[in-house]
Amino acid sequence: MKRHIFLATVLIVLAANPAMATTLPQWHKDLTYLSSEALAGRKAGSDTGAQAGDYVQKRLQQLGYQTQVQPFAFKQGFFQQGQGRNIISNDCLQNCVVISAHYDHLGHSGHNYYPGANDNASGVAAILYLAEQLHPLRKHITFAAFDAEENGLHGAKHFVENKDHDAVRLNINLDMLNLPRANSRLFFYTREPLCPMAKTHLDNSPIKTQLTRSNRSINRRLDGERIDWLRASDHWAFARQKLPFIFVTAADAPHYHQTSDTLAQIHGKRYTQTLQLLTQFIGELLGAHCDDFHVRE
């Protein structure tokens, strides 16, 4: 489906339901577009993948951020090279907390495409939400939408390898945030000590959370494949360079890498609570009560 057909469909829906135009939260609008057929699965190196990056950049600029496009090349198959594009806010110059999410996905196969609503439009919509909520802290935060994660974390690796390590205080990486079931948990996987004030938000959250330091504690709550969560997403690019990280994921992803990973599978209430929790958690983490990562003027 071409972009104009998708937009026409949206207009028809809104015309039939005029209240939707004003009542839909911005995260829902972001998720709707990023997982739409118009973007055909956001494959790294594709035209629609670039359009997804353009969308993220425009949204950050609308929120008052300075941005840059960070191009890079990555291996694509045995003999081809792809061209990726990281979208980076650059209001923070040193001692930055990098809040990241990858915006690429699997693209399409024949007439079918992979929407990637949970993986990882949910993470991208979250960084856009956080960019708005945490705008007063913009000189201490870098928002990073990484490309080519699905191909081997290439965007995150390029960012880290071309960044002064002294400029990175902490990476908070968001990947697959949907909580599909009432007993699903949001995991905060880190090797770093967290101050009690930040952990209090996790303990008092309306959604189930778990602070963990090992693969075992995540995997034992999931059925099926045993996953190395340390290397599962872009935070690994930071960890391998001995930079501190917090990986936030629901892990429970029944539609992982399937064409059924659609907006309809996102549980709106729990996702909203997740966004609110992340805002409180990160705000507290950077606040004066937390000595490990709080911002210093």
Image (spheres, helix red, strand yellow):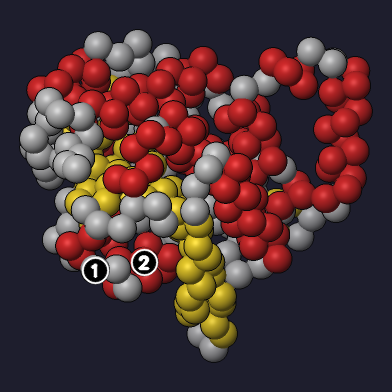
Amino acid type of the residue tagged 2 in the rendering: Phe
User: Can residue 228 be seen from the camera position used here?
Assistant: no
Q: Earlier in the sequence, mark 2 or mark 1?
A: 2
Counting the numbered discs, the total is: 2
Is 192 situated left or right of 48 in this image? left
Q: CA distance from mark 2 to mark 1?
A: 10 Å
Residue 258 to residue 130: above or below: below
Q: Secondary structure at mark 2?
A: helix
Q: Does residue 23 appear anywhere in the picture? A: yes
Position of residue 75 measured from the top left corner of the image (x, y, whole percent) = 48, 79
Tell me which corner region of the image, top left, top right, bottom left or bottom right, holds residue 63: top right
Q: Is residue 216 left or right of residue 237?
A: left
What's the amino acid at mark 1? Asp
Crowd class of label 2 (few under 14; some 14 to 19; many from 20; radius 10 Å)? some
Name the quarter where the C terminus is drawn: top left
> Residue under circle 2?
159
Nearest to the observer: residue 155 or residue 135: 135
As drawn, is 148 to the left or to the right of 26?
A: left
Q: Classify residue 105 by image quadrant.
A: bottom right
Question: Local crowd at mark 1 within 10 Å, few (<14), some, or many (≥20)?
Answer: few
Observer-side mark, 2 or 1, equals: 1
For label 1, the SS is loop
Who's the residue at 37% across and 71% down the image?
158
Percent coordinates x, y for residue 242 in the rendering? 14, 61
Q: Name the residue located 17 percent from the left edge and 57 percent from the top edge.
A: 243
Residue 185 point in image, percent of width and height: 33, 24
Residue sitting nearer the eye, 227 or 237: 237
Q: Which mark is residue 164?
A: 1
Looking at this view, is 59 or 200 the one in front?
Answer: 59
